[in-house]
């Protein structure tokens, strides 16, 4: 029935279009539900697919398997609807809520402050001997354990802990580190 109705529709028979709609509606609806869309979205997508077929029938004369074509169109339409809804949610959340919380100026200030902190930490690291700098780097940048660092540097794990403590102490005492927040931060490293 579907193939006959399709050929009649392509030849201009309006009743054949209604037959196609009635014949394939349940199959397309079940397909949409099966791939995870709700009933209203599936109904809207079916309407959109058949509207598109109706207005572009002259360009569809090459279609031989109407069932496959309809399922393919249905899937594409459902995912287009999903992408639009996701984009709207994404835009609403990121562009409206986050922009109101963090203006562009605030982000620039935060970035500048972060860069200043990094510079101060780098300056305070320069007062450390190379081995202590390496230990701090391994532990806080590479997240290596004291045992892993000890194996890398051919040291005792307890010596690594003591060296880390001394390095942090030296950084705290460093006169170049004037930012109270960084001093506070180093207390917890």
Image: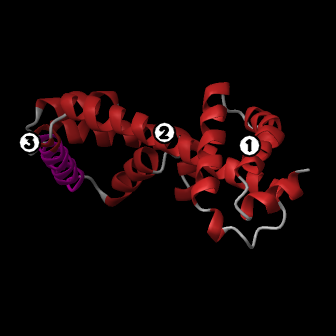
Picture quadrant of residue 134? bottom left
Residue 18 - label: 1
Provide the secondary structure element on which disc 2 rests: helix
* Depth check, front residue: 91 or 80: 80
Residue at the limit of the structure toward the bottom, as seen here: 62
The Cα atoms of the two marked residues, 3 and 1, are separated by 84 Å
Residue at the limit of the structure toward the right, as seen here: 1
Quadrant where the image shows the C terminus: top left
* Residue at the image position 74 percent from the left and 43 percent from the top: 18
* Depth check, front residue: 37 or 185: 37
Residue density around tag 2, few if under 14, some if 14–19, many if 20 or more, within 10 Å: few
* Depth check, front residue: 138 or 62: 62
* Residue at the image position 91 percent from the left and 50 percent from the top: 1
- Name the front one of labels 1 and 2: 1
Provide the secondary structure element on which disc 3 rests: loop
Which range is magenta? Answer: 108-127
* Residue at the image position 21 percent from the left and 56 percent from the top: 126
Question: Label 3 belongs to which residue?
Answer: 175
* Residue at the image position 52 percent from the left and 45 percent from the top: 83
Would you say 139 lies left or right of 21 here? left
User: Is the stretch drawn in magenta largely helix, strand or loop?
Assistant: helix
Q: Is residue 116 above or below residue 32?
A: below
Residue density around tag 1, few if under 14, some if 14–19, many if 20 or more, within 10 Å: few
Q: Is residue 133 above or below residue 175?
A: below
Residue density around tag 3, few if under 14, some if 14–19, many if 20 or more, within 10 Å: few
The Cα atoms of the two marked residues, 1 and 2, are separated by 33 Å
Give the percent coordinates (x, y) of residue 4.
Answer: 88, 57
Residue 86 - label: 2
Give the percent coordinates (x, y) of residue 138.
Answer: 45, 51
Give the percent coordinates (x, y) of residue 70.
Answer: 75, 52
């Amino acid at each position: 029935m579907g193939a006959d109705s399709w050929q009649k529709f392509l030849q201009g028979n309006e009743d054949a279009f209604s037959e196609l709609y009635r014949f394939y509606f349940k199959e397309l609806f079940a397909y949409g539900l099966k791939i995870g869309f709700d009933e209203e979205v599936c109904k809207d997508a079916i309407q959109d697919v058949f509207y598109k077929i109706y207005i572009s029938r002259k360009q569809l004369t090459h279609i031989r398997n109407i069932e496959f074509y309809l399922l393919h169109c249905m899937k594409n339409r459902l995912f287009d609807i999903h992408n639009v809804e996701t984009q709207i949610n994404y835009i609403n959340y990121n562009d409206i809520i986050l922009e109101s919380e963090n203006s562009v100026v605030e982000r620039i200030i935060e970035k500048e402050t972060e860069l200043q902190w990094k510079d101060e930490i780098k300056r305070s690291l320069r007062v450390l001997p190379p081995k202590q700098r390496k230990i701090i780097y391994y532990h806080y940048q590479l997240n290596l354990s004291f045992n892993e660092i000890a194996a890398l540097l051919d040291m005792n794990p307890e010596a690594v802990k003591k060296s880390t403590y001394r390095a942090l102490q030296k950084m705290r005492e460093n006169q170049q580190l004037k930012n109270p927040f960084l001093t506070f931060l180093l207390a917890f490293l």
